[in-house]
Amino acid sequence: MTDSDHIGRIQGVLRGELGEHAHVIADPYTGLRVTVISAEFVGMTPRARRERVQALVPDASIVRYDLLTPDEARFVELEEPTVPPATADLPLWPEALAHGKADEIVVRFPSEDYGTLPSPVVSTFYSLRGGVGRSTALAHAARIIADQGLTVLCVDMDLEAPGLSSLFDVEDRVTEGMGVVPLLAAAEMSGEIADLEQHVIRVTEDAGLFLLPAGFPGAEYARLLSHLDPPAWYADDEINPLRLLVEAVSGLPEKPDVVLIDSRTGISPLAAPLLFDVSDINVVAFYPHPQAKAGTRALTRALLAAKSRRSEDGDRCTPEVRFVVSPVPATSEVRELYSERAQDWVREWLSVARNHEGGPAFEALEEIIQVVSYREALAVSDSVMRVQGDDEFSVVADWITGLVEPHDVLGEHEDDEAAEPSKAEVLSSLQFAGETAENQELEELRGTFLSTADVGRALALDTVVVIGRKGTGKTAVFRKLAESSNAVVVTSPSSLDTYWSWTPDSNLYAEFERELRNRGMEWRQLWPALVALAVKQYVPSIPQPRWLDRPIGVLGAAGQYSKMDLLDDVIAVLSSPRASLLVGDWLLEIDRSLDSDRVLLFDALDTGFGNTDDDRVRRNDGVAGLLAVIGELGPQLGRLKFKVLLREDIWREVKVPNKSHLTARSARLSWSSKTDYLRIAIKQACRSDAFKRLVSSRLNKPDFQLDKTPVEYWPEDFVRSAWVILASERVSGGRTAYTDNWVWSRLADANGDHAPRALAQMMTAAVARERGFEEGNRYSRSIIRPRALVESLDDVSESALDALQTDEFPELKPLLRRLSQIGITPFAAEQLEETPQELVRLARDVGLLEEVAGPGGEVERYRVPELYRKALTMNRRGQA
């Protein structure tokens, strides 16, 4: 039955029983409106009349009754019984809650494109029920924001139960006639907010923290409050005192950067426009008890459907929403329980929200939910001025300050005599080395190579083994070493100019293994011969092996030394029954004949052996043999210096005697310093003369000239300031995190390791996106807007996953398919029970999976890092 048929049936029943003056129409939001004029109602109470109608149509959902006798109808002006329009733009409870019932809601947050907003940023703190720390969260966040150097105005809009003045310990400074209630009441009559400054109290002298109290609670206050009618403010052609008050704030002598509003709890008339109209960001406090679930769900959906006063490009924005879960018992087990319950609830509440591309509007719920533990000191304190609660409330402060437009933006100094380069000039010249080190031109590598403490140890002659994940810079170190005139490249990536016609490849390694097996020999007996023949190509004058009757290591018939020549010479050298002793002695003799040091370089010991299962077994045996030779012969050599660059998982896998001695002479490229990681981007950006001039103009000091100092030696605060100029300070939208922290966490694998290649790839993709964005939507707060970084993570993730399964660990492909099927992270460990455990262990070792232990210490869940999650098309648990 259609809705019109249903209404017609109900109307027919009522007319048949109560007369022809019975009308039924649909309410614009939900249910039905019934109007009946009938003599039967004479002598009946309103309640009896409603019960009579309900008895006739028990299946009808009636939300409004107009039930009158004929005599009463003559004195009442009834509305025409037609369906009234839904007033979509009114920020009032009936409208907001009705629009929040949609199955899908497209949102546009004010920070979505720009990251920040012109001040003041307005935030309303709200809770459906009392006792959940709403005002406390506001007051502590206000103190933190003010201590950061921003100006904060707190406004007490809990007009029926004002209390902020007491929390800030300034209650005795609130006098009769001052405050929100007198201001709003006067504005209803005059249409203006007069002398706002006289109503504002400065809370602290040493920070910009101010309070606009609700008022002095007396008889006059109660009288004025009873006359305030917020719904009427949004009627046509009416004065809107609330909007006037918010607009007047910008005219204060100390204009606030942030306005924090403490709202009345529940479905109060004033709370609706505060939440759905004037706020840029709403902080909803709740305790995860079932009593709060349904109401807070409805509120959240209403917030998603709201359109605030803030607009971009003519479109009104959706107010941001964040959640404070408070006060939660402080024990870790209970806190975890309530945190997971809150995330589950919020995920469902936000599941209807979609961005303009149709995807989920919220990705990481842990970034928009803050759990606050119960603390007795906070609970019993009369004033926030006497107790510190900064640790847990600093996140709440960050949510709000993350939306505040920075004072210093690009283009601010365009009229200076020494004009800075424009953003367009910088952006057009900006380039990052997104290619792998193998594919970079040598000149580009020299310009982007960053020397850190770890890199310095890797380059040092006394470092024998350089360990690192793919993309951490091993090949860049290799190329830097190979530039030296004393380098002897024994093995090399095939894409480099250090790869000779004789350089071993997977086919040659297979032939070597076959010859070793035929002779009952091991890899540790092959490597001295291979090293000696490599040195021969660089220093032709070295001694020949005395036990052979022909010269070896000489050019073949084609005028070059080939892989076949190398294989023949190795076979000849190993043909002697005493080869295992003779070859070592020959290498020692070569060492004594040299008049200068030679660095023996070994790279491509991973994919150089091939990628089949047999190749990987051969690789492990071969690398173990090489390390054994280094341990045995290395200490006896004076001029020849071994330098082996190894992938970390291979280093862990190989078994070699006295490995601890090699560990003491190893260096690990892990990029454990966030500042050094940022230096990579800054150094590459500084290849743009325009960017270097811009940074120098902003950051140069008389005692420290950036343009004359290598990036490696810039102080940490200068590095971060340069990063903010390059990529802004905050990632906003659903995040409001610092951009450097966001990049640092998103580009880490599950072991916390970072690859410079991933950062360069992100910056390359972000520059390309930014150039496109600038054509239709200029952004002057940094060279690259945060949105470009966020969207570029997809490109980096695809590249990282492709390298993992194609170049590094093709054996992981079955596990990767399984992860895509699981589709969410973190996930229960049981979901990998049928996956070979050696693959799971490899995935943990290489940073694809992170173990999450349960209360007993056993592995309960696995987490996939952001670096791979995107490409695996896995949702985050906590994604709405």
Image (cartoon, grey):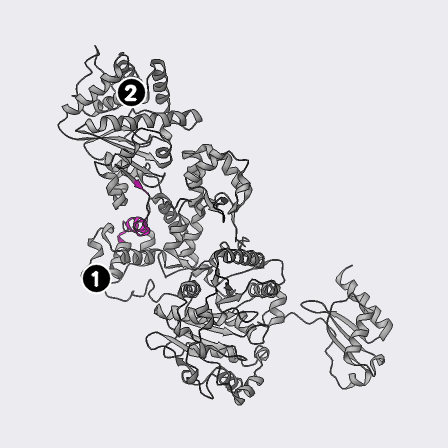
What residue did someone put label 2 on? 525
336 on left or right of 469 = right
Q: Which residue lies at the image location 54% right of the left edge and 75% below the top edge?
A: 264
Image vertical order of residue 802 relative to residue 556, above or below: below
Q: Quadrant of the N terminus?
A: bottom right
131 on left or right of 456 = right
Packing grade of label 1 (10 A; few <14, some 14-19, many >=20) is few
Please identify the residue farthest to the left as the structure is shown. 595
How many numbered marks, from 0 up?
2
Picture quarter containing residue 386?
bottom left
Q: Which region is colored magenta?
A: 668-689
Q: Secondary structure at mark 2?
A: helix
Q: Which residue lies at the image location 21% right of the left edge and 29% below the top edge?
A: 635
Q: Amino acid at mark 1?
A: Lys
The reply to whether the magenta stretch includes residue 678 is: yes
Residue 718 x, y percent position in the rendering: 27, 57
Q: Amino acid at mark 2?
A: Gln
Picture quarter containing residue 28?
bottom right
Residue 333 x, y percent position in the rendering: 50, 55
Image vertical order of residue 441 relative to residue 41, above or below: above
Q: CA distance from mark 1 to mark 2?
A: 60 Å
Label annotation for residue 701: 1
Residue 415 x, y percent position in the rendering: 28, 67
Image vertical order of residue 46 relative to residue 144, above or below: below
